[in-house]
Amino acid sequence: QVQLVESGGGSVQPGGSLRLSCVVSGSVFSVADMRWYRQAPGKQRELVAIITSGGDRNSADSVKGRFTISRDNAKNTMYLQMNSLLPEDTAVYLCNADVWVGPSTRRGYWGQGIQVTVSS
């Protein structure tokens, strides 16, 4: 069993900051790529940022310069530092990870999602 649990969401005013965390636990051999997605009401799920196990990262144009993805491999934890938040960043943010559950078995897992609301 593998679980992904997000934390750190909440409500903030425009221009504010939040830091999301995603912890991978359970029968984990190692964690490969990790991603943050978001889904706003009535919109398609959007890839926000991705980070490899080696630390290579990329992010959507809409968040470049404002959001930073990082990870701590020793803790199987990924972070999303979100600065200069805008109302259009309001969404449910979901953690996704490719997890090696054995030497030759890799599976994708999702967290349950966490709400981020940016409003004055």
Image (cartoon, helix red, strand yellow):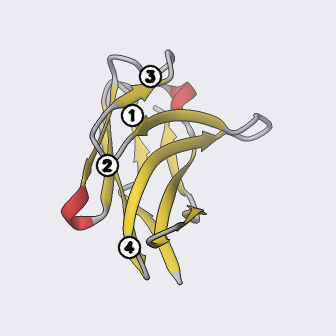
Residue identifier under label 1: 13
- Label 4 to label 2, Cα distance in Å? 20 Å
Which of pointers 4 and 2 indicates the residue nearer the eye?
4
Q: Which of 48 and 33 is in front in this view?
A: 33
Q: What element carries label 1?
A: loop
Residue identifier under label 2: 79
Q: Give the residue type at disc 1.
A: Gln
Residue identifier under label 4: 29
Closer to the N terminus: mark 1 or mark 3? 1
- Measured as percent of width and height from the top left, residue 25 is found at 39, 76
Asked whether, in this view, residue 14 is left or right of residue 19, the answer is: right
- Label 1 to label 4, Cα distance in Å? 40 Å
Q: Mark 3, residues whose alpha carbon is within 10 Å: few (<14), some, or many (≥20)? A: some
Q: Give the residue type at disc 3.
A: Val
Q: What element carries label 3?
A: loop
Q: Which residue is drawn at 53% across and 84% down?
A: 1
Work out which residue is located at the far right of the displayed protein and give it. Answer: 42
**Is residue 57 positioned above or below 11 on the image?**
above
Tell me the tag on residue 45: none
Asked whether, in this view, residue 89 is left or right of residue 69, the answer is: right
Q: Mark 1, residues whose alpha carbon is within 10 Å: few (<14), some, or many (≥20)? A: some
- Measured as percent of width and height from the top left, residue 62 is found at 51, 18
Q: Residue at x 44, y 71 (%)?
A: 103
Q: Mark 2, residues whose alpha carbon is within 10 Å: few (<14), some, or many (≥20)? A: many
